[in-house]
Image (tube, helix red, strand yellow):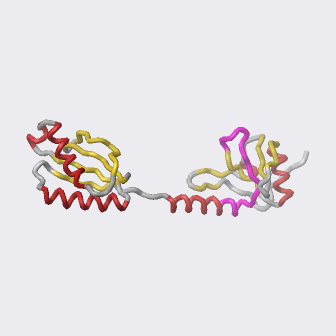
């Protein structure tokens, strides 16, 4: 019986972005789909055979897709693999855009000039790419007014917004009164 040992020091299971990466002897699967160091598909083989190929090349066998059937493993340098995974994760994080939700609050008695100022500010936010929640704040007896009247009050500020927008979430009753969510179209 041939005893196969991993090249270099024993590698422990490491984590990249809370995903455990198994290498060499830590791989539990008995059969693996192996990708060579040059990126060529070496096919499905037994774990021991794959470890022998990795040892022959002086590299490590790393499980890159454990949920596949059979799991996929790659023959590569462990440190280089961890570095590339961390680099991919950082690049993906840098490419994400965060969209902030800005809020504009009005009441039934908000005057035309104040509505125009709030609509102007909302237009600026929409131009920057933010989502906007327009809240019609209702106090006391105003909560029990005709819904059509309240809806018209919300639509009044929407008509004053100069930037093209689409309604992401229609006018609905909210705990404070009525609200609508809009975003740039």
Relative to residue 169, is residue 183 depicted above or below? below
Span shown in magenta: 66-82
Quadrant position of residue 162: bottom left
Relative to residue 177, is residue 82 depicted above or below? below
Q: Is residue 182 left or right of residue 51?
A: left
Foreground: 179 or 70? 179
Name the quarter where the N terminus is drawn. top right
Q: Residue at x 51, y 62 (%)?
A: 94
Say if the magenta span includes residue 80. Answer: yes
Image position, residue 127 (x, y; %): 35, 60
Q: Is residue 113 left or right of residue 44?
A: left
Q: Residue at x 73, y 41 (%)?
A: 29
Quadrant position of residue 170: top left
Image position, residue 157 (x, y; %): 21, 51
Image position, residue 14 (x, y; %): 64, 55
Say if the magenta span includes residue 26. Answer: no
Image position, residue 66 (x, y; %): 67, 44
Q: Residue at x 17, y 48 (%)?
A: 137
Foreground: 56 or 173? 173
């Amino acid at each position: 019986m041939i005893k196969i040992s991993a090249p270099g020091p024993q590698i422990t299971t490491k984590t990249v972005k809370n995903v455990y990466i198994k290498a060499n002897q830590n791989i539990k699967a008995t059969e693996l789909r192996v990708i060579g160091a040059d990126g060529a598909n070496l096919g499905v083989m037994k774990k021991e055979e794959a470890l022998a190929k990795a040892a022959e090349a002086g590299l490590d066998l790393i499980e890159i897709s454990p949920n596949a059937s059979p799991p996929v493993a790659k023959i590569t340098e462990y440190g280089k693999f961890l570095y590339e995974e961390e680099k991919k994760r950082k690049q993906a994080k840098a490419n994400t855009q965060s969209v902030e939700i800005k809020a504009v609050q009005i009441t039934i008695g908000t005057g035309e000039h104040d509505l125009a100022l709030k609509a102007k500010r909302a237009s600026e936010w929409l131009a920057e790419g933010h989502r906007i929640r327009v809240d019609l704040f209702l106090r006391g007896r105003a909560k029990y007014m005709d819904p059509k009247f309240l809806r018209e009050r919300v639509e009044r500020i929407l008509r004053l917004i100069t930037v093209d927008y689409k309604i992401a979430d229609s006018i609905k009753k909210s705990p404070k009164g009525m609200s609508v969510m809009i975003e740039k179209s």
